[in-house]
Image (tube, rainbow, N blue to C red):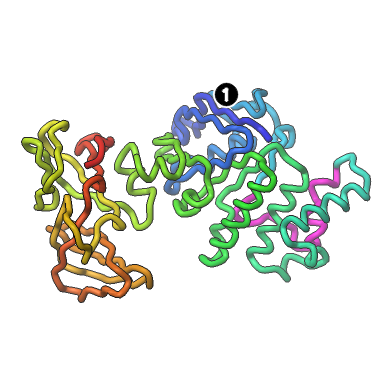
Amino acid sequence: MAHIELQGLVKAYNKTRAVHGIDLNISDGEFVVLVGPSGCGKSTTLRMIAGLEDITSGTLRIGGEVVNDKAPKQRNIAMVFQNYAIYPHMSVGKNIGFGLYTSKLSGAEKDQRILETARILGLESLLDRRPSELSGGQRQRVAIGRAMVRDPAAFLFDEPLSNLDAQLRAQMRIEIKRLHQRLGTTIVYVTHDQIEAMTMADKIVVMRDGRILQVGTPTELYEAPVDVFTARFIGSPSMNVMTGSIQAGALTAAGAIASGLDASALANGPVSVGVRPHDLLVGAPGTAGFEVTGTVTAVEPLGSETLVHLDIAGVEAIATAPGKLLPRVGSTVTATAQPGALYLFDAQTEQALGRL
């Protein structure tokens, strides 16, 4: 295992900065996911940790040792890529063992390590096959096996599941998580998929425009996002954000006054009001802290629940209804949110102000 520390890490291409002096501590055995939209700097950061990109300035430590100028092979890390990067002319066994060919292990020791790795990954019966005979998930397991067999201090994953279909991605998420629980090795994982981040990570790092916006557990980021971007990026479907205002301790949003919610601790003026689709309920009984009326524009039945797309005073929003409730498109419905479900953000800076 390895403790990885980034201090003021910068990556610039000529005069353009891709990564703006980020600081991050990754503990021994931690599963950390870097997440953000395309071009946010997450893959560049991973490649600097791997040694595949030069560091413009700042300090990178792995296991307490500064590795800025060390070659990738000297860092005792292994990287798994999006496109598998396995050799089509080699068998599964030879692909897994490729990283051992220059080691000082005996032939028997290499064979034993390959077999043990294949057993952990469920590839024992496939060792003699070629990659062309494998499914996408099996190929990705081979790529992981080639990284594992070297017994690295840390694994780096660069969007490894993006080439797989939805069902296979879900399966591989579980397999990688179980592998981490079994091996306990430090993992740094890059993805643009917030569902992968939420379901796999011990700690999530949200990035945007080469900067870190927030670091925390999946629950912390979901429950207490620091700004509108993080709030909308974490959670599926994305958080609804509406224009609102506070006057004399009362909150108004999307043309509706939130009843029974005390906003007196906040200054008067415009705010952005966020509410997650699973907290904005159609057909829910009980007293609401926030109630809006909208026109149904689309309905997505999901079995256990229904996602109801609404036009609320010209703002698009998504609410949730019980699975058997299918409102008619074009009809008018009322959606409610209980106290504590509203997130308030500064209208100018988009920074979080609290919840009501």
Residue 264 location (% of width, % of height):
12, 33
Front residue of 289/23: it is 289
Q: Residue at x 77, y 57 (%)?
A: 118
Q: Under tag 1, what secondary structure?
A: strand
Relative side of 297 to 120, left or right: left
Q: Which residue is mark 1?
A: 59
Residue 249 location (% of width, % of height):
10, 36
Q: Residue at x 38, y 45 (%)?
A: 222
Quadrant in which the C terminus appears? top left
Amino acid type, residue under disc 1 in the picture = Thr
How busy is the neighbourhood of tag 1: few (under 14 within 10 Å), some, or many (20 plus)?
some
**Residue 85 included in the magenta stretch of the image:** yes
Front residue of 310/342: it is 342
**Residue 207 included in the magenta stretch of the image:** no
Which residue ends up furthest to the front in the rendered image? Answer: 286
Relative side of 296 to 91, left or right: left
Answer above or below: position of 102 versus 95. Answer: above
Front residue of 52/33: it is 33
Answer above or below: position of 82 versus 187. Answer: below
Q: Residue at x 51, y 65 (%)?
A: 166
Quadrant in which the N terminus appears? top right
On the image, which quarter does residue 104 sit in?
top right
Numbered disc total: 1
Relative side of 352 to 142, left or right: left
Tell me the magenta residue range: 80-102
On the image, which quarter does residue 330 sit in?
bottom left
Residue 34 location (% of width, % of height):
50, 42
Q: Residue at x 77, y 53 (%)?
A: 117
Which residue ends up furthest to the left in the rendered image? Answer: 248
Answer above or below: position of 330 versus 35. Answer: below
